Image: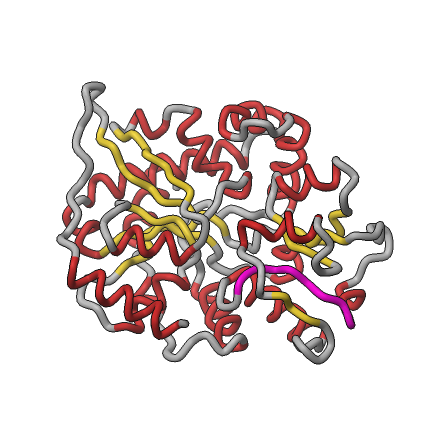
Amino acid sequence: MKKLFVAFFALCFMLFPLAGCGNKGNDGLKTIRVSEVTHSVFYAPMYIADAMGYFKEEGLKIDLTNAGGADNVMASVISNSADIGFCGPEAAMYVHISGSNDLPMVFGTLTKKDGSFLVSRVNEKENFSFENLRNKEVLAGRRGGVPAMTFEYLLKTKYNMVNETDYRMNYDVNFSYMTAAFEGGTADYCTMFEPVASEYEKQGKGYVVASVGEAAGEVPYTSYIAKNSYINKNPQVIESFVRAIMKGIHFVNNNDSQLVAEKLVPYFNGTSLDSLNTSVTNYKRIDAWQANMIATQEAYRNLLNIMNNAGELSKEIEYSALMKTDIAASVYNKLFA
């Protein structure tokens, strides 16, 4: 499957022309097409940047679409259906391995930890340990995806537990349907992002027992990615985009969860303010967001270790080859240094 994945990307590079920057509308704002891996409070700073008018201040208007998976996000970027992709950097890494000329680059990292929470069918909140997963079945994402790989790495390195020997990872369920499958009786544990995890527990369907990100440590988990040609052609757009996101991170980190949750209400139709408040609090508690939008080399090394452990990395890509840090560094120094 990975070979088909890489081959598809290589083909896309040959078939599609270079993308240009979005045209200005009647409001004078430049539309930027952003494809996100999923919709979650985990990405609160991006929605706050919109809610607070930070994008508008930069002359930008964001056309946001939910691609439902990192592979779909990267396909959108490569095919020029999106200007900016928002997903795990591993998706860009796979394209680098294919050796194409117009490579996708990570120009900013938003989240520095796994944003999923482990949900149990039984109430073991007071005495939970990951050791409880022995001889149990877990829904934690698709094979080769960072959520599943991070989960496997955590259990192996910290608890000496190996998939198919000490527990069983269920890769058969698409990420978008994991919660429904779990509710329908599949597996003993399921990882969920917020606000789904809080809503699930609030409805009495399960119990949030652990933060995967808190247990696993830092890793460049979700990043902003664009093709090298797009970045070179539109440097001011990328800089403006980064500045708006960075302001969003600062707002979330420096205001109470209740205020942030109130700003997020329009972006999560059907989710209660109480659940949004809980979700923001949970992510603030684990220090989820990368304030300067630059992943450390140590965190990147952790990602490579996670992927190697899962057998999903045929070639290691150097930090400097994938991570473009100069724009974020310049913006952060101007804003907060």
Residue 138: within the magenta?
yes
Magenta extent: 135-142
Closer to us: 14 or 151:
14
Closer to us: 292 or 15:
15
The percent position of residue 190, horizontal first and vertical second, equals 68, 55
Residue located farthest toward the top when viewing the structure as drawn? 27
**Left or right: where does residue 281 sit relative to residue 314?**
right
From this view, report whether residue 135 is shown above or below residue 69: below
Figure quadrant of the C terminus: top left
Q: Residue 26 falls in which quadrant of the image? A: top left
From this view, report whether residue 86 is shown above or below residue 41: below
The percent position of residue 30, horizontal first and vertical second, equals 22, 31
The residue that appears at 51% across and 54% down in the rendered structure is: 112
**Left or right: where does residue 269 sit relative to residue 91?**
right
The residue that appears at 27% across and 30% down in the rendered structure is: 60
The residue that appears at 38% across and 62% down in the rendered structure is: 91
The residue that appears at 24% across and 53% down in the rendered structure is: 79
Magenta residues, dominant SS class: loop
The percent position of residue 159, horizontal first and vertical second, equals 72, 73
Residue 173: within the magenta?
no
